[in-house]
Structures are given as C-alpha cells and as structure tokens.
Amino acid sequence: MPPKRRALMGRSTSASRRMAASRAAESPEQGQVRCQEDRTRHAACRTAETPKQRRNRVDDQRTRQAAETPAQRQVRREEDRTRHAASRVAETPAHKRTRSEDK
C-alpha cells in the first residue's frame, strides 16, 4: 500500500505553527530537555525495531537523499556540520567520553 499523501504540501498547519511558537518561547534549558527526551525516545524506538523495519527506514532515507539536488545536499551537509560543531562545543567531558566509547 503506498503511503498517504499530505494534502497541505508546503503549507504549515495551525498545529505546526503552534509548536513552532512554543519552541521559540522556551528557554535554552527547556530546549535542551526537550531535545534530550527526543534523543532518548528515538534511541528506544531504534533499539526496538526489527531488522526489516531498520532496512525500510534506511531505504526511505536513501530515497529522500537521492532525490536531493547537489545544491540541496551541500546546504544539508553544511547545516549538519554547523549543528555538530555547536553540539560538540556544548558537550561536557562526560558526554565526550560516552561518545568516544560508542565508537
């Protein structure tokens, strides 16, 4: 069965605008807590997924990235580099140890 198509392609919904306003109004600490909760939830989901579910998730990601233009890919990679650099600057020594142990 093909995935459902979004009716409002390229438009934001009232719920997405409300969430964007909520995120913009949160303090940096609240943002960090929200992001940490997201990371924890995503890690738990990925831990529980079956090999077939993982393959499907990775294939979907590959399909999306294959559809990128070179300019879009360059922008995405630059944003990733910037985000990772900011994340590493903000990390504590304990986070660095955890990250290096994961490798």
Image (spheres, rainbow, N blue to C red):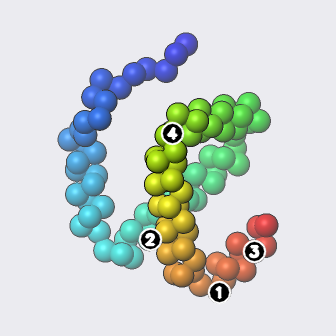
Question: How far apart are labels 3 and 2 at the CA level?
Answer: 21 Å
**Residue 32, which numbered label?**
2
Q: Which residue is mark 3?
A: 100
**Residue 68, which numbered label?**
4
Check disc 3: other Cα within 10 Å, few if <14, some if 14-19, many if 20+: few
Q: Earlier in the sequence, mark 4 or mark 2?
A: 2
User: Residue placed at 24% from the left, 67% from the top?
Assistant: 25
Residue 19 appearing in the image: yes
Mark 4 in CB contact with mark 3 (< 8 angstroms): no
Question: How far apart are labels 3 and 1 at the CA level?
Answer: 11 Å
Using the image as rendered, state which of residue 29 and residue 93 is in the foreground: 93
Q: Earlier in the sequence, mark 3 or mark 2?
A: 2
Residue 37 appearing in the image: no
Check disc 2: other Cα within 10 Å, few if <14, some if 14-19, many if 20+: few
Mark 4 in CB contact with mark 2 (< 8 angstroms): no
Q: Which residue is mark 1?
A: 93
Q: Residue furthest front?
A: 70
Question: How far apart are labels 4 and 3 at the CA level?
Answer: 31 Å
